């Protein structure tokens, strides 16, 4: 699908800022597009400081939660941590378990089985805790939508603390949203309306870190001892795809640096088996290499493998790392099979133009529903829900586009659902199969998406002539890292570039290397999978079919979107453009 190119243009004294910061004006445009605040805020963005993390005591119920934990430690009560089966839930448990053990707590943990238990704490987990003699339950990365389980815990005499970061469920009364908070003894979640904590976008491990910070402060443990947890909070922050702004940016910037020198045998072993250098770790490596291995455990086996890996050493670490890697390889193959089934379902039912695509895929493992929904959403630029049949009805995941809040969409159709929860961009749901068609009809009737909202949009940071790009420019651009949600990798554009050479690369000749002439110099651009993308472009836009793109593209002028990088080969480094979109220039 052809995207709509838009250029962001915030009025600012870029020349003055460039002189003050000694950065090129094009990079200053990228900076203001991400941080359009005061000069002090700009400097905080460029130089994230751990000393500027907010006081965790500002979180509602934090003091009460710490008091309850200290009481449980003093009384030698068994504390049970209940996490989630994804990367965020696993890292939350690792951080909290490590810290509580150092505080002298009698503590263990439970992570629900994705298939048997479903998401989050439930009555069975609560009952088992009671039977095991647990005195205090603490949830991490779940619990805010588990009012039934929390109520049951209180009914049978258990103390319970909920820590979470997900959106708080709500009901509509007299046209107003009223949040429904579970009746726990303490609820620590920055998204509560009456919580004064200034930053609302922490991940679950971020909230866990805040709890540990408060606990250490109360016990007089030196603040320096908190630093060992920052790399794991950074992994969760990137892996859970929360905003990389504010506190999250501080945590990830410092966490990545600390990870380069990690002594955790489990992380080192997973990096080795995944063929990545931990010393060059980045948000990309976490998001697309290591993170999927952690998530594969919760999808196809048990998320407890992640906890075991992080606490393991030597041969045990290498064994578990290899098992996680192999699980992810299996997950990849199953995902590709599921995507083919999804495409066939869309074609056979003719639903590619539905404002919200709802798919029931009986032969897909329920743990892969979210990944498949995400891939369908990217292809068709439609909010997508993928459902699979389970013993307890249809379960599935939703992935959305910026223009549609899927959490609110599900809430409007909640009468058809058994349960649901999540964020504006991603959610999980369960419903009876008998309600499927009614749910689909109601969801579409209430979606209110308009035509232009269903066209993908790419926002360009600045126009940039490739001839101006130097290695120094690329190094300066790295000051905006780490990139991720709400702090995206910059997108530059240039028009009327002459293609002087064309090369097809890769075993299947599906990648393109284009050589451009710009301001009297030659600059290389690499377009991964560009052969298919450009053939599709000519077919859709120009109604033409071409087999030999080399002949068609050579000496053609084009408009491109790109990100500049440094490519090093045989010890020689030079600027290379990573192309993300392509169009033939208007003649």
Image (cartoon, rainbow, N blue to C red):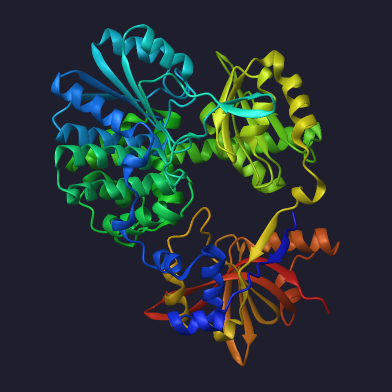
Q: Residue at x 50, y 41 (%)?
A: 332
Residue 432 location in percent, x, y? 64, 15
Residue 199 against residue 581 in the figure, above or below: above
Q: Quadrant of the N terminus?
A: bottom right
Q: Residue at x 29, y 33 (%)?
A: 63
Viewer-nearest residue: 506 or 80 = 80
Q: How many marks?
A: 0
Q: Residue at x 75, y 52 (%)?
A: 455
Viewer-nearest residue: 368 or 8 = 8
Residue 518 against residue 285 in the figure, above or below: below
Drawn side of residue 325 relative to residue 520, left or right: left
Residue 3 location in percent, x, y? 73, 58
Viewer-nearest residue: 571 or 210 = 210
Q: Quadrant of residue 492?
A: bottom right
Drawn side of residue 313 relative to residue 457, left or right: left
Q: Quadrant of residue 383?
A: top right
Drawn side of residue 328 relative to residue 397, left or right: left
Viewer-nearest residue: 487 or 432 = 487
Residue 445 location in percent, x, y? 80, 30
């Amino acid at each position: 699908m052809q995207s709509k190119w838009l250029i962001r243009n915030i009025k600012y004294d870029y020349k003055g800022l460039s002189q003050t910061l000694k950065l090129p004006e094009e990079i200053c445009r990228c900076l203001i597009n991400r941080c359009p605040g005061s000069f002090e805020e700009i400097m905080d963005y460029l130089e994230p400081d751990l000393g500027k993390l907010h006081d965790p005591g500002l979180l509602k119920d934090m003091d009460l939660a710490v008091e309850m934990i200290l009481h449980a430690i003093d009384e030698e009560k068994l504390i049970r941590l209940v996490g989630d089966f994804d990367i965020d839930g696993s890292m939350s448990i690792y951080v909290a378990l490590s810290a509580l053990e150092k505080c002298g707590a009698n503590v263990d943990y439970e992570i629900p089985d994705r298939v048997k238990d479903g998401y989050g704490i439930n009555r069975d987990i609560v009952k088992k805790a009671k039977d095991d003699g647990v005195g205090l339950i603490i949830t991490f990365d779940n619990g805010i939508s588990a009012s039934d389980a929390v109520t049951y815990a209180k009914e049978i005499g258990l103390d319970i603390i909920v820590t979470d970061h997900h959106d708080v469920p709500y009901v509509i009364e007299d046209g107003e949203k009223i949040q429904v908070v579970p009746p726990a003894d303490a609820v620590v979640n920055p998204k509560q309306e009456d919580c004064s904590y200034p930053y609302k976008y922490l991940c679950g491990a971020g909230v866990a870190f805040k709890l540990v910070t408060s606990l250490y402060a109360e016990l007089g443990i030196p603040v320096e001892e908190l630093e060992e947890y920052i790399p794991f909070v950074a992994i969760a922050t990137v892996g859970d795809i929360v905003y990389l702004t504010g506190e999250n940016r501080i945590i990830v910037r410092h966490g990545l640096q600390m990870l380069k020198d990690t002594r955790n045998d489990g992380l080192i072993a997973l990096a080795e088996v995944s063929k990545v250098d931990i010393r060059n770790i980045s948000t990309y490596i976490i998001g697309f290499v290591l993170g999927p291995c952690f998530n594969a455990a919760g999808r196809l086996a048990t998320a407890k493998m992640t906890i075991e890996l992080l606490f393991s050493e030597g041969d045990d670490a290498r064994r578990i790392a290899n098992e996680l890697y192999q699980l992810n390889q299996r997950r990849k193959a199953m995902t590709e099979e599921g995507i083919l089934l999804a495409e066939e379902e869309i074609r056979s039912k003719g639903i590619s133009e539905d404002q919200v695509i709802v798919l029931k895929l009986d032969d897909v493992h329920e743990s892969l529903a979210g990944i498949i929904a995400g891939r369908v959403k990217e292809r068709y630029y439609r909010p997508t829900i993928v459902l699979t049949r389970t013993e307890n009805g249809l379960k599935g995941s939703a992935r959305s586009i910026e223009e549609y809040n899927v959490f609110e969409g599900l809430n409007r159709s909640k009468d058809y659902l058994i349960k649901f929860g999540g964020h504006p961009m991603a959610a999980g749901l369960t419903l009876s199969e008998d309600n499927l068609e009614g749910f689909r009809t109601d969801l579409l009737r209430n979606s209110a998406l308009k035509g232009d909202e269903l066209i993908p949009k790419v926002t360009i940071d600045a126009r940039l002539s490739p001839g101006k790009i130097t290695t120094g420019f690329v190094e300066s651009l790295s000051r905006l890292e780490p990139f991720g949600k709400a702090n995206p990798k910059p997108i530059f554009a240039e028009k009327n570039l002459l293609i002087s050479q064309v090369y097809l690369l890769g075993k299947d000749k599906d990648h393109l290397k284009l050589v451009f002439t710009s301001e009297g110099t030659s600059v290389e651009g690499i377009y991964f999978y560009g052969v298919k993308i450009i053939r599709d472009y000519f077919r859709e836009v120009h109604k033409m079919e071409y087999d030999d793109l080399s002949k068609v593209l050579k000496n053609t002028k084009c408009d491109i979107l790109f990100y500049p990088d440094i490519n090093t080969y045989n010890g020689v480094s030079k600027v290379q453009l990573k192309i993300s979109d392509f169009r033939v220039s208007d003649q």
